[in-house]
Image: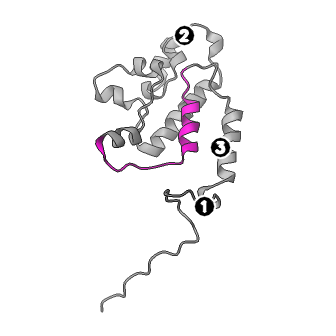
Amino acid sequence: MVDAAAAECSALYRPPELYHLDDPAMVDERVDVWALGCTLYAGMYGDSPFQYALATGGSIPLAVLSGKIKWPADAARQQQAPAVSYPSEMHDCVTWMLNADPRARPSSADVAARLRAMLDSPPWLQTAKPGVWTPQFDEAPLPLPPKQL
């Protein structure tokens, strides 16, 4: 199974259990939950959560097996650079899906329920938090300047 995964799966999206398989029973729908977590992270930040291993000359399997995720916001804070900010609920959900222990990783039904709950309470329906900008759909955009003829 590990050999088939090496041939068929992208290394940056392959779950830990497909690098080091102790028990074939550990391979179930949660491998797809891992891949979904990697895909959500990539959609948010444009790279795999384990891209840093390639960039630093490290080992992708070791990075995946460690379960350590490098969040761009963390790197931006260290460099005092601006970062894209997503709701903490989204970070928590991706972190939950990228649990290196497949027994602690959620099922697809758990993920669907959590994402559905997040969609039922979008930022524009939540109470504004002091000091945090939240996009509001009722804010009118600035008018366009008049066209010069």
Tell me the distance, in whole angstroms, between the alpha carbons under discs 2 and 3. Answer: 29 Å
Mark toward the start of the polypeptide (3 vs 1)? 3
Q: Residues within 10 Å of mark 2 (few under 14, many from 20)?
A: few
Q: Image point 42% across, 18% down: which residue? A: 61
Q: Quadrant of residue 100?
A: top right
The amino acid sitting under disc 2 is Leu
The amino acid sitting under disc 1 is Trp
Tell me the distance, in whole angstroms, between the alpha carbons under discs 3 and 1. Answer: 16 Å
The amino acid sitting under disc 3 is Leu
Q: Position of residue 50 (x, y in %)?
A: 41, 29
Q: Position of residue 47 (x, y in %)?
A: 40, 38
- On screen, residue 115 above or below 25: below
Residue at the disc numbered 2: 21
Q: Image point 56% across, 65% down: which residue? A: 136
The segment highlighted magenta reads 79-100
Left or right relative to 118: residue 61: left
Left or right relative to 28: residue 9: left
Q: Which element carries disc 1, helix, strand or loop?
A: helix
